[in-house]
Image (cartoon, rainbow, N blue to C red):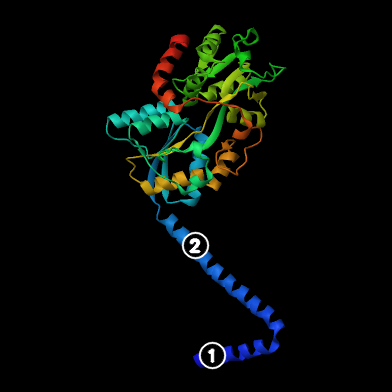
Amino acid sequence: MKQLFIFAILVTMFFLTACGGADESQSEAAGNSNDSDTTEVNENDGNANAEEEVAGVTGSISFYTSQPDADAEKLVNGFNEIYPDVSVDIFRSGTEEVISKVSAEKQADDIQADVLLVADAVTFASLKEQDLLLSYESPELASIPNEFIDEDFMFTGTKVMATVLAVNTNDVADLPTSWEVVTEEVAEGKVMMPSPLYSGAAAYNVGVLTRQDDFGWEFFEKLQDNDVTVVQGNGGVLQAVAAGEQSYGIVVDFIVARAKEEGSPIDLIYPEEGVPLITEPIGILSNTDNEAASKAFVDFVLSQEGQELSSDLGYTPIREGVPAPPGLKTIDEMEVISADVTELLSTREEDKQRFVDIFGE
């Protein structure tokens, strides 16, 4: 058989030499065919390696988050489509309560969380300071803007969420353009906001706004004088404004856009002075019992597929190249108000106490 094969090759070479230029095209086609075969083999090898990698990720992890319940479940479902052998247990509450749970577990020397996804970078900076986070340089970070990645790879942002002004369009005919409206007579007794004692976004907002010359603590004192209503979380603000119980709300943008799309008489404004911005970072707890599955979960959240899922849920993705959902601005389109994270961390408890001094518990 081997001799016949060699003889066939010699005959083919003689034929190619005799046929000249026409055979060059045949030779090129043959070369392309061989390249295709090689590519197919390489792709098969890659698929096999990917399948082996997925198959090697098993067990269970605990996922602590401040995301809405339904969104957290959809995120986990998307992850399980790729990693079906990983069981993910979800604990969901406001950022401050999630962190209180982690702190209590730390005191008991029994932290149950493996992966954490909550409101803001200040919260994660505190956990990093306590050596509670695992450094992980996910391969997906290549597509995430550097300013949203911790320099030691302890955490990274997962989405872009601005706090905006929501209005009930049945009550408010002329849409405002400035934050000042919530301190004016037209809005007296008609404004609602979340509490920084429960919401991480609200805690971040208080820290950022009080460090701006155009706001300061005077802005919050004016809100109190204007009979603002303070509730636990952003969800309560949305419900009240959408139902017409309040005319104005200080609330994160994505839930307003979602309610508007579903037909609620509500709209959102990015005020001209700018908006505070959080990125809902994700990180792995340093004591995780399942490092492989925890890393796979982080990779999924930051991946193209994970970020497209985030956009489908109504969030502005943080990954480059994934567009924002209808009704929301990208970070490039926003005027962002910010403050130094280190300073916000050092004064967070003081800021909360001053908020309580103004509004009460």
Residue at 37 percent of width and 32 percent of height: 127
Residue at 45 percent of width and 46 percent of height: 138
Residue 307 pos. (x, y %): 55, 43
Question: Quadrant location of residue 309?
Answer: top right
Note whether 309 is above or below 275 in the view shown.
below
- Residue 154 image label: none
Closer to us: 218 or 81: 218
In what quadrant of the picture does the C terminus appear? top left
Left or right position of 123 against 328:
left
Three-letter amino acid code of the residue under disc 1: Ile
Left or right position of 329 against 6:
right
Residue at 47 percent of width and 22 percent of height: 203
Three-letter amino acid code of the residue under disc 2: Gly
Residue 334 pos. (x, y %): 61, 29
Disc 2 is placed on an element classified as helix
Q: Which residue is mark 2?
A: 46
Report the Cα–Cα distance between label 1 and label 2: 33 Å
Disc 1 is placed on an element classified as helix
Residue 299 pos. (x, y %): 47, 46
Q: Which residue is mark 1?
A: 6
Left or right position of 97 against 193:
left
How many residues crowd mark 2 within 10 Å: few (<14), some (14–19), many (20+)?
Answer: few
Left or right position of 345 against 280:
left
Q: Earlier in the sequence, mark 1 or mark 2?
A: 1
Closer to us: 138 or 201: 138
Q: Which is more foreground, mark 1 or mark 2?
A: 1
